Image (tube, rainbow, N blue to C red):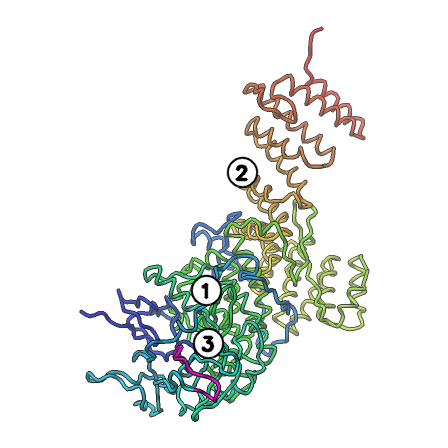
Amino acid sequence: MSAQRCTQPGCTGTILDGYCDVCGMPAAAGAGGASAVGGSVPGASAPAPGASSLPSSVPLPPTSLPASSAPVGPTSSTRSSVTSSSNRLASAPIGSVRAKGTRATRKVGTSSTRLRGARLGAGLTTIPPIPEIDPVAAIMKNPSVPEDRRYCPSCGKPVGRTREGRPGRTEGFCPNCRTPFDFAPKLKPGDLVAGQYEVAGCLAHGGLGWIYMARDKNVSDRWVVLKGLLNSGDPDAYAAAVAERQFLAEVAHPLIVEIYNFVLHEGAGYIVMEYVGGTSLKSILKDRMRAAGGRYDPIPVDQAVAYLVEILPAFQYLHDLGLIYCDFKPDNMIQVGDAVKLIDMGGVRRIGDMDSAIYGTVGYQAPEVPDVGPSIASDIYTIGRTLTVLVMEFRGYQSTYVASLPPVADVPVFAAHDSLYRLLAKACAPDPADRFQSADELRVQLLGVLREIVAAAGNSSVALHSAPSVLFEAPVVSGDDLTWEELPALRVDTGDRMASWLAALSVADPAERVKALQRAPEETVEIHLATARAAVEAGRYDIADAAIAKVLADDPWEWRAVWLQGLAALAKNDAVAARASFNAVYGQVPGELAPKLALGLSCETSGESDVAQSLYATCARTDANYTAPAAFGLCRLRRARGDLDGALAALDLVPSTSRAFVEARRQRAGLLAASGRGLNSLAAAMDSISAVTIDPLDRARLTANVLDVALAKVLSDGADEKIRIDGHAATEPHLRDGLEAAYRQLAQMSDDGEERVRLVDQANRVRRWTLR
């Protein structure tokens, strides 16, 4: 029996065990138009490597989200990750879940900062460079379109196929809709296009026709790329090319392929663009699959996220110009050296353009596009879908999961990276109003997710530094017990009309501050949020609730108001309500640590200890500003379940540069002193505080406690002269000397006469007596 060829458009694989060995689609996969290298066919689809259809109905979005429960690194299994999931908890209603209608413009969560580095990886990880492809080597030796890639440019039906033993025609008319097709190159080597561009050969065949390599005879024989039409009789393709000629001259960005010119030659139009000898992410995926023996091998998650972090400024640039890219996918982003570029501008159109043909790819295109057209939100959707394809074997992405993500329990990378899943769920939300509202907003959150991923992989240097948030202040660390007042404060949106007035308001007392805010010259979002915060501090929850309600009535997606709801709930000791609010905020800003810390505190208080531990662990290992409060939280949870080693390990996470380091050392000493483990642990207890400056009274009390326990150990189990505890050998005489001195020091520090007498008596009882 001969091997069966894959029937997916654009795929050259063979069906093995029911699935294609290249694209991963099943033998009976549904039809769809081709989307070949360099372009797209309207309404067509191009399979991602490793993707396949599954014969089941489209599911609802997952209801369980994993979170790591270890201090570093991901969880060991999907099952335990889902158990410690925070997304399985109830969330406060927010956005379209609360109310439908026109969404108010959000100003927070966006940033125009272009975070670029000298190399890929945003300074957090490393992506290996890829050598530039020599232009001559890129030229096709036999420029032809395989029959299995020939589809009608209008209806998407197969054309030009072998019949009755006769090879298919490269030109003709579609038998279904009678639209003419022509897959033969129009240009040949040596042709001079527009008197300037000498054709060297074919580079590839794309959705809009052949792509040629040429030399610009007017500019030092530089290599250029000529992109032609699919066929001159296709009005949509011709209109797309004309549209490119009209506005692509405006586009000039280092991350976007440069358009040099638009020329006509023998009745056909060609776009002239720079040659970028790079490798597309789709080709990288195929190369990885080939190296893995046909098994899908996704791009490492940190590298995949870093790719998207790097390319997002190109999208923000286009959106700022009023342009929509429309058809982003792994095919259209290339890497060359240690840089990336966005290529194939064939689908770009202006925002609000209701006449031009819409170009998109099934599985990547947002579900609302066929009805309402493309938008910034639909571009965000394609970015989210592309990232999903890069990090996992996304079977059924064009069928079962064409408008949703698979369940977390079925996807290890989702189970291992809580925040990544949350980010993808928001970017790919079915309702465009629920998605990120700008590429910059997405990039800010994606950077936070990348930090978490790198930290979870064991890069401990991440936690040694802090990454200031554009949305939250740093948490306040005043002790080992975290309270709602110490959670990070919201940053004021400087674009608010009352931001300057708020900055000048210097009323410290919460009740008086509430009164001052109620007399503000103008009511704005920031005034309402500040009023709510001050009212919670003053215990005026009625005022806080009213201010929050005003904000949400104007913009149901304003997660900052929901954040304040969570603070109010914690202040009222309603940990379950706080949990729901902070869980909702986490879903809106998944790259931020503040909602994770707040949710961890709420879960700890409400008894969801597994979830709390996973959230604290993420915070502790990711950012220096969050290490101390999260480490103390981990310590509390582990002490409660009798895990002394885990509690000590949590305290050891607090770096010496932290203001909480002394408290962590003091707690560590106290835990060891109370552990009952033996003389070595008691010695380690004193070593914990030997090099730090702590309150003299605390030091003296701890010293007396440790030496008292040590003396009892020696009396019951015997001495060990090799062990020294606070400089005293672990023998009865030496420990009695040290303990006596500690009691007498405490007596000198006491202001209570009776207490001094009691301590002196204790000193006398433990002193060693000698006969003279």
- The residue tagged 2 is 645
Distance between mark 1 and mark 2 Cα atoms: 49 Å
Sequence-wise first label, 1 or 3 = 1
Assess whether mark 3 and mark 1 are in contact (beta carbons under 8 angstroms): no
10 Å crowding of disc 2: few (<14), some (14-19), many (20+): some
Residue 275 within the segment the image draws in magenta: no
> Which residue: 54% across, 49% down?
609
- The residue tagged 3 is 365
Q: Amino acid at mark 2?
A: Asp
Q: What is the magenta range?
A: 192-207
Residue 291: x, y in percent? 35, 60
Residue 512: x, y in percent? 81, 60
Q: Amino acid at mark 1?
A: Pro
SS category of the residue bearing label 1: loop
* Disc ID at residue 131: 1
Sequence-wise first label, 1 or 2 = 1
Which mark lies nearer to you, 1 or 2? 1
